[in-house]
Structures are given as structure tokens and as C-alpha cells.
Amino acid sequence: MKKTITVIILLIIAIVFSGSLYWLYQKNQEDPVVYETEQATTETIIKKTVATGNIVPKEEVLIKPNISGVIQEVYIEAGDQIKSGDLIAKIRVIPNVSTLQSARNGVETSKIDLTNQEKIYNRQKELFDKGVISANEFDGIDVAFKQAKQAYQSSLQNYQIVKTGSARGLGTAANTLIRSTVDGMVLEVPVKEGNQVIEANNFNEGTTIATIADIGKMIFEGKVDESEVGRIKENLPLEITVGAIENKKFQAVLDYIAPKGKEENGAIQFEIKGTLDKKDTTFIRAGLSANASIILAKVDSVMALKEALIQYDVKTQKPYVEVETGEQKFEHRDVVLGISDGINVEVKEGISKNDKIKVWNQIKKSEFDN
């Protein structure tokens, strides 16, 4: 019995020993993994987020008429540079029948009153000349006559304004002549000769005859997602790229972030605005699509590593790298990182530029590769 147990034990030992030899043999047949290394480089790292939007004028002025009618002539077209006071268009007034009749009645009423006051004046003047009435009494009659004459002239002028939009003596203040109120470029003329226009008043915003803006003051107007808005702040620098202008970047400053977001396609978007640098004289057409890179942080000429070389401790989550100390021998080295652009990351402490860093996620070649 003891002999049988001894034999079984020896057989088990022999099998384990043979398996170990076979495993070592197979291990020796595998190609060893050779880890490559890389060194730190000097980089300028920019941490940024991107917003999409348009280039628009900082201020657009809508020129509207102060009288309703039909466009008789248009003196400008889009692209023209004009100054404040320049003539834009002329309107032919089509009077409202009710208003016209009321103005006509006003003329007739004031004419009747004038005729009556003139008769009184003539009678009283004869009496005054004969010394029947005093000078004070005659002065009151004279004033009433002059007031009646002034009222008649005023009613005639009002009738002409209602009928034609202008009257003798108004000069450049004529309602039918539409003039620019600012200096700038004409961006749009949405009306043509023959179009009917409505005056701007408390109940109607009126018809826009022209849109004028100073193209020397352009801004980027875009939107950022709610996940990004917490990372930005006013006065951050912007780099603007316009799709229609190749190989050109425009500098701007973020000067507005909307305090309230709006839902668009299931996401909350916040409006932002940035004023473009006035020193750049490149002509940018209003409304062009653009992208703005909002620079959150920037460092120049710093030691940097590729993000792929950084490892993180499983327990502490602290970053570290493996530095080569001999042929295919590496040691653990903790590092202090700075800003990252997603490709390169700033290394503040832990390594030198001469250290060779292990490419830790080395992919072993397939046995089928040549």
C-alpha cells in the first residue's frame, strides 16, 4: 500500500516537472516585447474650446420712414459708403382719405374765422382812426386778426403735409426725403421703387428702407454649450477663423456671455460675443460663418510630453511615467503636470528633457506580421 502511494506521488511530481519544462520552453519561443521610448519636447501649449457662429457688425441701424407712402426713388445700393444726412430715398405720399378730409375741413374753418376777424378789424380800425375807441381796445382786435391769419396759414401747411408729405418752408425736414442718420456702409436695401412703406410709430415698427453699419466695428456672435460655459469668462482672447477667408486668423476679445441659456436641439446654448481687433483691415462681409477658439490657458516654450505617455496610479490616480534606467529597464517616476491641449501636456516636475520615457501601451506584433 505504501509502495503504491509512493509511486503515485512520484508520478505527480514527474508530470508537474514536465509541464513546467514545457511552459518554460514555450515562453522562450515567444518574441520578447521591446518597449520604445520618447523624450520630452519644448512646446507652446494652448488649452481652448471652440464656438461656432457668425461675423456681424457691432451695431446695425435700420432706417425707417416717418410717413407712409410709396417709394418714388432709391438713391443708394448695398455696398455704398454713406455719411449721416445723405439722401437715401424719396417717398410719394398716398394720403389717408379721412385724414385728408379732416385737414381740408380745418382749412375751411380757419378761412371762415379769418374772414370774420378781418371784417371786425376793418370796422374797428375806422373807429380807431376817428378816435372813437382807445388804442388798447384796438390792439386786442389787431392781435385776434393776426392770430386768425396765422391759424389759416398753419392749416394750409398742415393740409399740404397730409396731402404730399411736405410743405413750402420745411426744406430738408420734408417727410418725403429719407436720409441716413449714421455714417457707414449700406448692408441691405430691402425696398425698390414702387414698394409701399409704413411709417414707424407706437403701434408699428415701420418698414425698413435700408440697413447701415460701421464695418470697421465687427464682432463674433456665437454659442457655446452648457458644458463649456463654466470654463470661460469675459476678456479671454479669441482666435477667429472664417471659412470664406483661408489661411487667416483674426484676433478678438470675449466681452459678453449670456446670463441665460436657450434650449436648441435638446441642449442648452449660451450666446457669446467677441469684438474683433480693429487693427486688422481685412474686409469681412457681414454674416459670414466663423469658428472661435476660446483660449482658456496658454504657455510658451515649456517642457511637454505626449498625453499617451502618461500613466495614472490605480489607487491614488496620480500621474507618473516610466523612465529608462538601462536596456529595457524602467523605473517609476511621479510627475507634476500643467495644462494640456489633448495631445501634449506640460510637465512641471519629475523628469528632465534628456530622460527617455517608456511608451507603455506598446502593441505586441502579431505572429503573422513579417
Image (cartoon, rainbow, N blue to C red):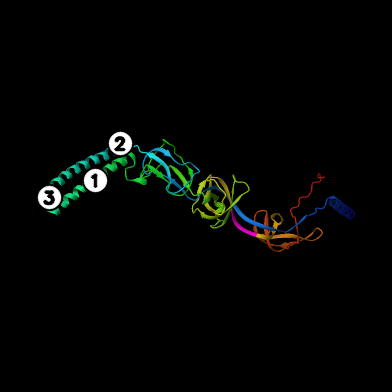
Residue 204 image offset from top left, x and y in percent: 38, 43
The secondary element bearing badge 3 is classed as helix
Residue kind at label 3, given as amino acid type: Asp
In the picture, measured across the screen, residue 33 lies left or right of residue 121, that is right
Q: Secondary structure at mark 1?
A: helix
The magenta segment is 294-299
Q: Residues within 10 Å of mark 3 (few under 14, many from 20)?
A: few
262 or 53, which is in the foreground?
53
Residue 297 magenta-drawn?
yes
Image point (29%, 39%), residue name: 99
Image disc number at residue 151: 1
Q: Residue at x 14, y 48 (%)?
A: 125
Give the label on residue 129, or none.
3
Q: Position of residue 255 (x, y in %)?
A: 52, 55
Gap between marks 2 and 1 measured at Cα: 22 Å
Residue 123 visible? The answer is yes
Q: Residue furthest top?
A: 194
Which-is-in-front pick, marks 2 and 1? 1
Disc number placed over residue 97 in the picture, else none? 2
Q: Which amino acid, by three-letter code, is at mark 1? A: Ala
The secondary structure type at the circle numbered 2 is: helix
Residue 155, percent across and down? Answer: 26, 43
Q: Quadrant of the N terminus?
A: bottom right
- On whether residue 176 falls in the magenta region, the answer is no
Q: What amino acid is found at the position of numbered circle 2 in the picture?
A: Val
- Which dot, 2 or 3, sits closer to the camera? 3
Judged left or right of residue 237, residue 12 is right
Looking at the rendering, which quadrant does residue 346 occupy?
Answer: bottom right
